[in-house]
Image: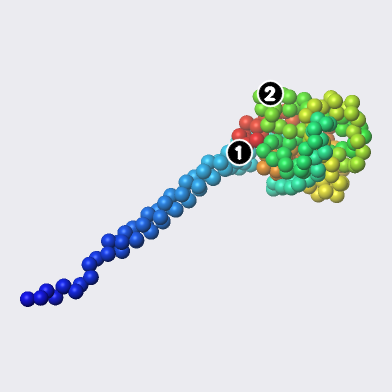
């Protein structure tokens, strides 16, 4: 007697394996995405923590000498670097210095007594940070096309010189009523955001305390 299953097709082993391979590929892709997300979170954690510490979790009684710029504003490609230390050439604008804290002085190349004092103060305040001083960059934003005094530059090794038109930095760097941009020292964070402004004729010892707080609160830069 002839079996009724004689003509039936045998099961194809590959038919069952194909969905399994698809499932495995999907699981690997999901695992890869989760790993990438975890890496991004680890990288961003110091940035998030520093801003939570400084802007959100404000301990009772905590005071700042400098004025916090709120909301944060990105300064963008402000200015053009012309030299560091008066000699070393470097391409780009201020955004090319990202990754470091920046103490910024604005003044014409002639650099009057007030300008010289501010350059001296940012140099000395940076030195007081000790082992953290390499996290801090000093920038002199020159507001004209003249050349600074070489003897002055010789006193400020490592100072980054930049140029920018008045219109450009007047919008990016707010002054207080009755003062000019050149009356202040500004702090830019490692992400390129303007975040603090020191008052005219600032007290260096109090600036030092603010900068030390910033460096402690952030592992960025």
**Local SS, label 1:** helix
The x, y position of residue 159, in whole percent, is 79, 31
The x, y position of residue 141, in whole percent, is 83, 39
How many tags in the picture? 2
Earlier residue among tags 1 and 2: 1
Q: Say the numbered circle drawn on residue 92.
A: none
Which residue is tagged 1?
50
- Labelled pair 1, 2 in contact (Cβ < 8 Å): no
Query: Horizontally, is 163 left or right of 126 in the view?
Result: right
Residue at the limit of the structure toward the left, as seen here: 1
**Local SS, label 2:** helix
* In the depicted structure, whether residue 20 falls above or below residue 112: below
The mark lying in front, picked from 1 and 2, is 2
Please identify the quadrant where the C terminus is shown.
top right
Please identify the quadrant where the N terminus is shown.
bottom left
Which residue is tagged 2?
130
Callout 2 crowding tier (Cα within 10 Å): few <14, some 14–19, many ≥20: few
The x, y position of residue 191, in whole percent, is 67, 42
Q: Residue at x 54, y 45 (%)?
A: 40
Q: Residue at x 69, y 46 (%)?
A: 72
Query: Horizontally, is 29 left or right of 221 in the view?
Result: left
Quadrant for residue 65, please give it.
top right
Of 189 and 201, nearer the camera is: 189
Which color scheme did the rendering employ for the protein? rainbow
Query: Horizontally, is 183 left or right of 135 in the view?
Result: right
Q: Residue at x 62, y 31 (%)?
A: 216
Q: Is residue 182 visible?
A: no
Of 109 and 71, nearer the camera is: 109
Of 71 and 62, nearer the camera is: 71
Of 89 and 120, nearer the camera is: 89
Tell me the distance, in whole angstroms, between the alpha carbons under discs 1 and 2.
20 Å
């Amino acid at each position: 007697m002839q079996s009724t299953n004689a003509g039936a097709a045998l099961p194809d082993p590959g038919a069952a394996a194909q969905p399994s391979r698809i499932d495995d590929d999907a699981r690997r892709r999901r695992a890869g995405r989760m790993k990438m997300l975890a890496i991004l979170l680890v990288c961003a954690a110091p940035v998030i923590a520093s801003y939570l510490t400084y802007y959100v979790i404000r301990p009772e009684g905590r005071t700042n000498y400098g004025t916090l710029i709120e909301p944060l504003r990105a300064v963008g490609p402000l200015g053009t670097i012309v030299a560091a230390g008066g000699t070393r050439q470097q391409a780009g604008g201020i955004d090319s210095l990202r990754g470091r804290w920046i103490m910024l002085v604005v003044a014409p190349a002639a650099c009057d007594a007030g300008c010289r004092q501010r350059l001296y103060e940012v140099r000395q305040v940076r030195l007081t940070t000790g082992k953290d001083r390499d996290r801090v960059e000093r920038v002199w934003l020159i507001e004209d096309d003249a050349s600074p005094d070489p003897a002055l530059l010789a006193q400020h090794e490592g100072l980054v010189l930049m140029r920018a038109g008045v219109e450009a930095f007047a919008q990016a760097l707010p002054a207080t009523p009755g003062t000019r941009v050149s009356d202040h020292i500004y702090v830019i964070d490692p992400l390129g955001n303007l975040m603090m402004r020191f008052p005219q004729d600032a007290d260096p010892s109090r600036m030092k305390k603010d900068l030390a707080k910033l460096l402690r609160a952030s592992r960025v830069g």
